[in-house]
Every structure is written in structure tokens, then in C-alpha cells.
Amino acid sequence: MLYIDGEWRGAQSGSSFEVANPATGEPIGDVADGTQQDAADAILAASEAFSGWSRLTAFERSEYLQRAYQLMMERKEALARLMTEEQGKPLKAARNEVQYAADFFLWYAEEAKRVYGDILPAPRSDQRFLVLRQPVGVVAAITPWNYPVSMITRKVAPALAAGCTIIVKPAEQTPLCAMEVFNVLHDAGVPAGVANLVPTADPAPVGDEFVTNPAVAKITFTGSTEVGTMLAGRAATTMKRVSLELGGHAPFIVFDDADPEYAAKGLSLLKFLNTGQACISPNRIYVHDSVSARFLEVLEERVGRMRAGNGLEEGVAIGPLVDAPSLEKVDRQVQDAVAKGARLRAGGTRLMADGMDRGFFYAPTVLSGVTRDMEIYNNETFGPVAPVIEFDNEDRVLALANDTTYGLAAYVYTQNLGRAMRMFEGLDYGIVGINDINPTAAAAPFGGMKSSGWGREGGREGITEYLETKLGGFSI
Ligand code: NAD
């Protein structure tokens, strides 16, 4: 269903599309297929609601967000189960995501009250300068399927806190999770038109309305660099503000002074999270020559113990990939690497046993001896493959790590404080984990440099993306 102007309704076309479980291929729901006209209606509703919502006090807006936090926490288990069915990640990971998603409501319920202005020294004695921060206006958001709840709240919470109204177009693979987020907002009493949802099976016409409709002041997008670049280019013709969270190609560097067992444990937990379908997933694993044997041994052993299957089953660590093209891309990258001389140490095949042939499962895979001529070295994988590259020198590995158009997340394992600081400062990435595999939280700014995007989500920075700065010069 679409959620427009405070009501659930069907699409103007009357048509709908099926949503399937990627672990079993079975249909799990039927969702109204929003059209360009539906998107225009949602934008109109958001425009009409803007004046009332933006004039509420920050304390009032905060209360709605606090209620949304409470409701999402109450519904955590049901929402996590739905996420596992619709997106495929194991239930434990789905619970973690719901918690992360709810945290944005709470964090921005608090940040709503910390949007301060400034009084500046003016050049004349009869002049006063005041700086005011005001909501940008109507926001159009496009979100991906891999984190189907948190990628919505990471946009909706700061937008609403700032006083903006919003329309969300969720990914076509995961509209059911999006609908549950909007049920939370509805039940929290968020006024009609403030937050609207337009699911669709065909994103282009809805996206077209977002970037061309003059009532939209800002586009916020999370997804591939290709689509994000296209949307940003089109949004520029009407000077809409744009925030982009795009792809990544994260380096994971293990130095000779690090504990290779600890690093291998960290990598196995991080790389296979969400079956590798994360923008901050390590894609190039650089391990110093002197510790690579032990690192690979521990990694292989841990990967060998991972069980793939339906995420609702106990003990499953690897869920399915989202669709058939993703499976083909992962396998193509692995086969290309092996053909060019990489050593396959684990996995390397599609999984078909125990009914897994009905879903899109790929075995957790470890490759060593990966080189720069291989496709996997150069492109984001978005799958459960750990490509290991050996190195012998700090300056060289830093240059290799930075030698990509992406700049989202990077990870470093070292016990040397000076080296940790040099890497933190030298890596051209928006997020750097030092002996840390989870440098993310609602309170922390998340985002990338270079082709990984514009702007930051979360943290103090996240709300500024939804604010305009206005200067007042007063002669008295
Ligand atoms: P995608 O760009 O194909 O899809 C993302 C969203 O864009 C979906 O809602 C989709 O429907 C929409 N979309 C697609 N074509 C469109 C069009 N022509 N007009 C308007 N909207 C359109 O990306 P994907 O492959 O589904 O998602 C994976 C990508 O997302 C990866 O590159 C990943 O790194 C990135 N990602 C980034 C972050 C981050 O925070 N930086 C987080 C999650 C995912």
C-alpha cells in the first residue's frame, strides 16, 4: 500500500506487484505499485503539511520521534522476522538492524532540540548579525533493500526533527519493511502529509517526479553510485539540495604488528555480515606477508564453520543474496579471479542442497593471491567473498588502499599507535575502523568521500543536511 496524506491507499493504476522471500522464492506479499502521479500526490501532501510541521516547536517534533522509537522497540521482534523473510539476513542481524534503525528516532528526537542559531560580531556598531537554521522544505528520499529499515529511519528521523516533510520511495525488493516503518510513524501520531510512502516496482517514473517536481527542495539517496550520479545530475537543473550515500570498496589492512587471529576473527564477522551485501563490507583484504599464513588459516577455519540457509533457522550465519543477477555477479568475479591465478581456499560455488536451490545462496568464499588485474580487485562485490592480497610495506599499502574512486569505509589492524594515526589521517575514506569492525552508530557521522557520496547521515552532522542557514543583518 501507499501511505499518502496520513492514509493507506492503493495505486492510481490499480496495479500491484509481488514481493518474494529470497531464501525460498515464495511470495510473501502483494504491494500497490505506485505511479508517477502517486508520487506527485505525495509531494503535494508533503508540501501542504510543511507549514504546520515546520512551525511546531522542536519539543513537539521531538515527542513524535520519541513515540516512534518506543513503538519500534515494542515491535522489534515482528519487524526483525519480517526483515528476515523479505530481505534474507539472519534473524539476529535483523534484530540488530531494527535496534540501529530505532536509535535514529531517539537520537534525532534529542538533536531536534539542539538546532541552534548564532549571533555574530558585526562590522558596524549599529548593525547586528543573526544566523538562523531553518528546514530546507520537502524532501524526497530513495532507499535500498540491503538495510531496509535503518536506511529509511536514517533519513526520516533527521528530516522530521529539522522540520522537513518527506516522501520515501523504498527499494522494490523490500516494500513490506518500509510499510511497517510507516505504520510506526502513523501510530506515533505523526500528522497527515508529514511522512509519505510510495512503493513501486518501476523506480524510474517516481524518481523522475522527485527530481523534476519544483516543490521538492531536497533529494536524499542511498544506493548505487550509478543511479545516485544520474539523480544528482538531474536534480541540479532545479538546484535541489542533494545528499548521496553510494557504493564502497573498502580496504581491510592487517599489519605485521597486529594479532592475525584477532584480525581474521574480525574479518570473518564483518565480511559475511548480511552476506557481504553492505556498502561498508571489506572488499580488498591486504595482509602483511609475515602474518598472512596464520591469518588465512584462522579465516578458513571460521568460514568453514559458517552455515548458510533460511535466516529464521537457528545457527544460520549466511543468508541468500538478493536476486539472480547478484548471484551471477559474485560467481563471475570469483571465476575471473581463479582463472587469473587466485587460489580458492573456501567456497566458490552456488549452494543448492537442502532446498537452497530455490533461493540465491552462494558459499562463503576465501581467495588468496588476488592481484590488480582481477575484476574482484577493482569492483564492489556485494557478496560473501573475501579476496586476500599480500603486501610488505606501509606506504605501498596506503597507496593501494587509496587507489580507487570509492571512499566510504576502511579498516586497519595494528598495535602501533603512530601507524594507526598515520593510517587514520592518510586513508581517503569517510569512516576508518582501527582494530574496530563496527564504527557505526546513530550518534556517528556516516558517509563517504569521492564517488561514495555527498554529505553525512547520523550524528550531529545528519540533521544539518536538512537545514538551510539564513543570515539576518539588522540595522538598529
Ligand atoms: P540501486 O541504486 O539499484 O537501488 C537503490 C535505490 O534506487 C532503490 O530504491 C531503487 O529502486 C532506486 N532506483 C534504481 N533506479 C532508479 C531510477 N532510475 N530512478 C530512481 N530510483 C532508482 O542500488 P542497489 O544495487 O539496489 O543497492 C546496492 C548499492 O547501494 C550498493 O552500491 C551499495 O554500496 C549501496 N549502498 C550504500 C549505502 C551507503 O550508506 N553508502 C548503504 C546501503 C547501500
Image (spheres, rainbow, N blue to C red):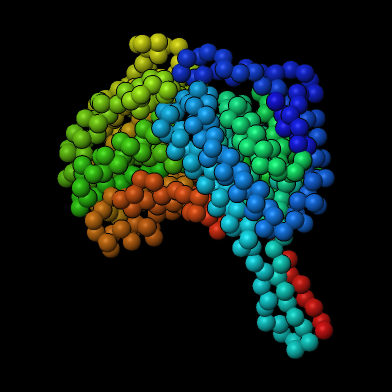
Image side of residue 70 versus residue 207, left or right: left
Question: How many numbered circles are shown?
Answer: 0
Quadrant in the picture for residue 475: bottom right
Position of residue 391 relative to residue 147, above or below, is below
Q: Which residue appears at 78% of the width and 49% of the height?
A: 50
Image side of residue 171 versus residue 129, left or right: left
Q: Which residue appears at 76% of the width and 26% of the height?
A: 9
Image side of residue 8 versus residue 48, left or right: left
Can residue 222 be spotted in the picture? no
Image side of residue 54 versus residue 273, left or right: right
The spot of residue 147 in percent (x, y) is: 51, 35
Q: Which residue appears at 67% of the width and 58% of the height?
A: 59
- Nearer to us in this view, 317 or 427: 317
- Nearer to us in this view, 327 or 470: 470
Position of residue 100 relative to residue 429, above or below, is above
Can residue 23 be spotted in the picture? yes
The spot of residue 327 in percent (x, y) is: 44, 21
Q: Which residue appears at 30% of the width and 50% of the height?
A: 435
- Nearer to us in this view, 313 or 407: 313
The spot of residue 371 in percent (x, y) is: 31, 36
Residue located farthest toward the bottom when viewing the structure as drawn: 125
Quadrant assignment for the N terminus: top right
